[in-house]
């Protein structure tokens, strides 16, 4: 069974928050609609 493409996302340790711009960049990279992800209504 194939898992598809895999990409590394850095982990800087516990207690480090991932900022919104970093999350949005990951969403773009994985072609995920950011409005759908964040639960925004059209």
Image: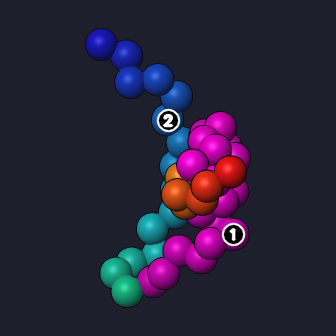
Residue 28 visible to the viewer: yes
Label 2 sits on residue: 6
Query: Where's residue 19, x and y in %?
Result: 59, 76
Instruction: Using the image as rendered, state which of residue 36 and residue 24 is in the foreground.
Output: 36
Label 1 sits on residue: 21
Residue 39, label in figure: none
Disc 1 element: helix
Q: Which of marks 2 and 1 is nearer the N terminus?
A: 2
Query: Where's residue 15, x and y in %?
Result: 37, 86
| Residue at 46% in and 75% down | 12
Whether residue 11 is situated above or below residue 30 in the rendered picture: below
Q: Residues within 10 Å of mark 1 (few under 14, many from 20)?
A: few
| Residue at 48% in and 81% down | 17
Instruction: Using the image as rendered, state which of residue 18 and residue 36 is in the foreground.
Output: 36
Q: Which stretch did the figure color magenta? A: 16-36
From the image, which quarter does the N terminus lie in?
A: top left
Q: How far apart are marks 2 and 1 (CA)?
A: 20 Å
Q: Which residue is at the far top? A: 1
Q: Which residue is at the far left? A: 1
Residue 26 visible to the viewer: no
Disc 2 element: loop
Query: Where's residue 38, x and y in %?
Result: 55, 60
Left or right: 42 in relation to 11: right
Q: Which residue is at the far bottom? A: 15
């Amino acid at each position: 069974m194939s898992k598809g493409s895999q990409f590394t996302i850095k982990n800087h340790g516990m207690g480090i928050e991932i900022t919104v711009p970093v999350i949005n960049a990951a969403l773009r990279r994985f072609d995920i609609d950011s409005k759908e992800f964040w639960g925004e209504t059209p």
